[in-house]
Amino acid sequence: MKKLFFLICFLGLVNLGFAQRIAIMGALDAEISILLEEMGKVKTETHGGIDFYKGKLKGKKVVVLKAGVGKVNASYSTAVLVENYNPKALIFTGVAGGLDPEALPGDIVVGDKLVQYDFGQIDSTGFQVAPFRKLRGGNHEDLFIYADAALVQKAILVAASVDLEPISGRKPKVYQGVIATGDVFISSDDKARWLYEEFGALATEMEGAAIAHLCRTLEIPFVIIRSCSDNANNHARVNFNAFVGPASVNSSRIVLGILEIMQ
């Protein structure tokens, strides 16, 4: 009987040690630095060449990491994350190029669905975007990958109420809709217009849809939150460098707000 008691206690401690955390990812140091400062006490663990920062934010157990830029880095980082931490949810925070003609640098886009715009085939008629391939072969039926509806709702609720940093003397607007992902930094009026007209995309970036694909495959609830550092137009590179800092601040504030209302 005594042995059974100690076994139950041991298993309880094991389960506590492997309690699921909420994962928070960004592609750049600037996109996660504010969160790391908020965590205070942090335990750093390294797996597969990636530093994982364990701690608490708003009373929730979290693990924060930098995914790196691009779909390959984002996919690899997500795979290593899942293998070692099995997160109960994933929030991606960072900057993007805005695509809505009325959007300005600093505006927020909460992605309720993601599309990979550079995956497809080229034939005599030109380039045709295709849905993601399934692991066991064949394409998914839908071109879009849908984020977790509950997390999207929380993000929209928080974004509407949180104190966002003004950019160029203007309070950022909040949008909900499509985020287009590709391994290209868009700095072209024509390409930005195509993404907006072809997919209804409100922002473009280089990681979201890859992370979404893995999360869908592994049934992990996720949401992608992007603060626009530029408008993906001919001046995007200049605007990105100017606004990446304050845009990252606003995206991080929304993440903190989501954590505060999560169960």
Image: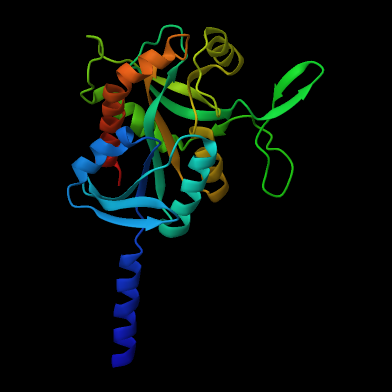
Most foreground residue, 92 or 140: 92
Q: Residue furthest left?
A: 40
- What colouring style does the render use? rainbow
Residue at 26% in and 38% down? 33
Residue at 50% in and 34% down? 70
Q: In the picture, which quadrant includes the N terminus? A: bottom left
Q: Position of residue 93 (x, y in %)?
A: 36, 34
Most foreground residue, 157 or 198: 198
Quarter where residue 225 is shown: top left
Q: Is residue 76 above or below residue 6?
A: above
Q: Position of residue 154 (x, y in %)?
A: 34, 33
Q: Position of residue 90 (x, y in %)?
A: 41, 44
Q: Is residue 186 left or right of residue 34?
A: right
Most foreground residue, 93 or 61: 93
Q: Is residue 32 above or below residue 161?
A: below
Q: Is residue 47 above or below residue 127?
A: below
Residue at 35% in and 17% down? 107
Number of callouts: 0
Q: Residue furthest right?
A: 124
Residue at 18% in and 52% down? 41
Q: Is residue 185 left or right of residue 10?
A: right
Q: Position of residue 4 (x, y in %)?
A: 34, 88
Q: Is residue 199 left or right of residue 250?
A: right
Q: Is residue 45 above or below residue 23?
A: below
